[in-house]
C-alpha cells in the first residue's frame, strides 16, 4: 500500500521561485514574469505583463536575443514581430487599432517598414508603401511593370 503525504502551507509569499538547477535548464517565476532557460543558461522564453497591463511573450534565440515578440494591447489590437539577430524588425503582423483589420508589414535591413499588405476601407486587399514623410500611400503599378506582368 502506497501512502502519499500531503503538505499544506496555507499562504506562502516568495519573491521568486526557481525550478531546476542554478545553471543549465531551469525556469523562474516571479510576480511579474515567467522565464524559461535552456541547458546553457540562456533565457529562451519570457512571458510577462508590461507596466501598462499589456501581456507580452518573447521567444529568444540561443544567445538570448529576442526573435519573436507577441503582445495584445488593451484595445484588443494584437501584434507579432519577427526580428533579426540585431533586434531589428524583418516582419510585423498586427491588427490596426481602429477596427482590428490585419496588416502584414515587410521591413528593410534597418527594420523600417517599407511595404504593407492590408485590407482597404472596402475590405479588399491593398498594398501600401511609405513615402518620404513616412505616411502610408497606395502602391501603384507603373505602366512598365504592367507590361512585364501581362
Image (cartoon, rainbow, N blue to C red):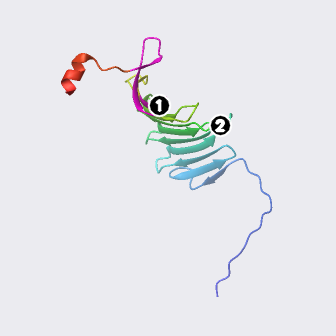
Q: Which residues are magenta?
A: 117-138
The CA distance from mark 2 to mark 1 is 26 Å
Determine crowd level at label 2: few under 14, some 14-19, many 20+ residues with C-alpha closer than 10 A. few
Q: Residue 57: image x %, image y %?
A: 55, 42
Q: Please state which of residues 117 and 30 is positioned toward the viewer in this rendering.
A: 117
Q: Residue 56: image x %, image y %?
A: 58, 40
- Height in image: 136 above or below 94? above
The residue shown at (64%, 35%) is 75
Q: Please state which of residues 43 and 118 is positioned toward the viewer in this rendering.
A: 118
Q: Earlier in the sequence, mark 2 or mark 1?
A: 2
Determine crowd level at label 1: few under 14, some 14-19, many 20+ residues with C-alpha closer than 10 A. few
- Height in image: 119 above or below 35? above
Kindly state the secondary structure of the residue where label 2 is placed. Answer: loop
Quadrant of the drawing holding the C terminus:
top left
User: How many labels sit on residues?
Assistant: 2
Q: Residue 11: image x %, image y %?
A: 80, 58
- Is residue 20 on the magenta stretch? no
Q: Please state which of residues 129 and 43 is positioned toward the viewer in this rendering.
A: 129
The answer to whether mark 2 and mark 1 are in CB contact below 8 A is no
Residue at the spot of label 2? 74
Residue at the spot of label 1? 122
Q: Residue furthest top?
A: 132
Q: Residue furthest bottom?
A: 1
Quadrant of the drawing holding the N terminus:
bottom right
Kindly state the secondary structure of the residue where label 1 is placed. Answer: loop
Location of residue 71 by image quarter: top right
- Closer to the camera: disc 2 or disc 1? 1
- Height in image: 39 above or below 61? below
- Is residue 127 on the magenta stretch? yes
The residue shown at (64%, 49%) is 29
The residue shown at (74%, 51%) is 14
Amino acid at each position: 500500500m502506497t501512502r502519499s503525504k500531503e503538505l499544506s502551507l496555507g499562504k506562502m509569499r516568495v519573491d521568486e521561485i526557481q525550478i531546476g538547477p542554478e545553471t543549465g535548464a531551469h525556469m523562474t517565476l516571479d510576480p511579474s514574469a515567467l522565464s524559461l532557460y535552456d541547458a546553457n543558461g540562456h533565457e529562451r522564453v519570457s512571458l510577462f505583463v508590461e507596466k501598462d497591463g499589456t501581456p507580452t511573450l518573447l521567444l529568444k534565440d540561443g544567445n538570448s536575443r529576442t526573435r519573436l515578440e507577441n503582445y495584445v494591447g488593451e484595445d484588443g489590437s494584437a501584434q507579432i514581430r519577427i526580428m533579426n539577430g540585431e533586434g531589428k524588425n524583418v516582419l510585423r503582423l498586427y491588427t490596426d487599432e481602429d477596427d482590428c483589420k490585419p496588416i502584414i508589414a515587410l521591413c528593410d535591413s534597418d527594420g523600417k517598414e517599407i511595404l504593407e499588405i492590408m485590407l482597404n476601407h472596402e475590405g479588399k486587399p491593398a498594398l501600401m508603401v511609405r513615402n518620404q514623410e513616412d505616411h502610408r500611400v497606395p502602391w501603384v503599378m507603373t505602366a512598365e511593370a504592367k507590361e512585364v506582368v501581362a
